[in-house]
Amino acid sequence: MRLTVCAMGLMMGFTSSAFALNSTENLQRALAQIPQTALSNPQAMQILFVDIKAWRGLDKAAPSADAMRRLALVQQIPALQPIGYGLDEWSRHAKIAFDDVAYFASFGQAPASVTYWGLKDQAGVKNLLESLKQSDFVAVDPTVPGLLANGEAGKMDLSKANAKDPWRGSMGTARFVLPLEHALVETSAADGIKQLAQPSPSAAESAVTLTAVAGLDYAMATGQGDIVQAAVISPIFGAEAIDPEKLLAAAALDQDAARQQLEAMVKEQGRGVPPYLGGIIADVQIKATPTVAISLAYPDCQTADKAIAAIQSAWGEMAAAQNARFAGESRAADKLCAAVVTLSAAKVDNAGNPLLSEIMDRYMQRDLPLLRIGTSL
């Protein structure tokens, strides 16, 4: 069964939805703060997101090795890298309790990546800024209200290097921070900071992102789960042999032109899913069940249905499929359509997600047929 979803309504009114969950709202908040230009970056995973409450809910005590390993999608977010030293150490250096952070989101490649510290309210942002001012952060540009830095852009200061400190890291490089409503934006330089201060149009307003989020929202609503982490992906994720810049340029065209160019590019790819415009892959915990939710944006639901069939075929060949449940459905959202797939594991006795582990392991080996773009089953 297909159901039409008003994607714009989702963008504007997550909190009013009877099925809206805190982690879903946090993802939408994060996307609304990120400029849409992030979706032009020639990267497979363009935006990373982790919901702190959902992740901490997997393991109430100090994070176990399984909980740490589970962060496979978002391990490149700079602010998360020191947590291996313990959350108490992290909190002491960050000037905020780890559990007072609602989410982290990030885009771009290190060292030029941009990280969003999503807090629970604006008062939390104000308090964190005051704490940073009492350390070594100072105002650096009167034309950008609230902009602080703890050093000179691009300059290492090994005397201040501290791998336990998310504001310094192992090389002692400076960080720039800017308040943005409920979040604090962290960058390695002030370049482009004015665009970050006014992120309009945002990633949340992209038709492709709206469609992918609508599909993910449906997957979440049916199981009443929490998004632990998610990645906004581009077609590059499934196109190992195609020039990434040409692929993104084609995806940005109008629907008919995009379809024609994408189909031409994948003619020689062989077996795989139809070329998608973009999407989201999410690590979801539904009650005690680790789940992977995938939502891909397509020009029409006929193509989305083909994608679901191709994903199911590829999934059946993966080891993790033996003890997992597959579900798929296409969801119309305004002018596009989402191919929505959920992969649910058997109940596990630890904080891990074996399905996500296999998917990411195969992806890192450049051998992930699940989302590989091709022309046939």
Image (cartoon, rainbow, N blue to C red):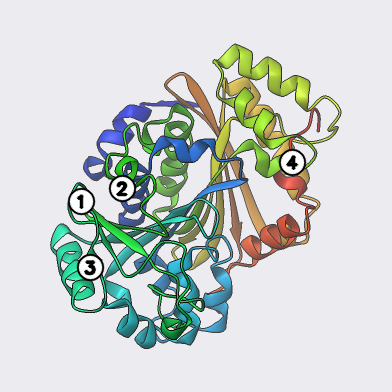
Amino acid residing under circle 4: Arg
Which residue in the protein does label 3 denote?
Answer: 138
Whichever of callouts 4 and 1 sits on the residue coming sooner in the sequence is 1
Q: Nearer the viewer, residue 373 or 244?
A: 244
SS for callout 1: loop
SS for callout 2: helix
Q: Residue at x 77, y 45 (%)?
A: 314
Whichever of callouts 4 and 2 sits on the residue coming sooner in the sequence is 2
Amino acid residing under circle 3: Val
Q: Residues within 10 Å of mark 2 (few under 14, many from 20)?
A: some
SS for callout 3: strand
Whichever of callouts 1 and 2 sits on the residue coming sooner in the sequence is 2
Amino acid residing under circle 1: Glu
Q: Can residue 57 be seen in this view?
A: no
Which residue in the protein does label 2 denote?
Answer: 29
The residues tagged by marks 3 and 2 sit, at their Cα atoms, a distance apart of 27 Å
Q: In which quarter of the image is residue 173?
A: bottom left
Which label sits in the foreground, 3 or 2? 3
Q: Residue 181 carries which label?
A: 1
Q: Nearer the viewer, residue 76 or 225?
A: 76
Residue 64: x %, y % from top left: 51, 84
Decide if residue 43 is on the left or right side of residue 362: left
Which residue in the protein does label 4 denote?
Answer: 372
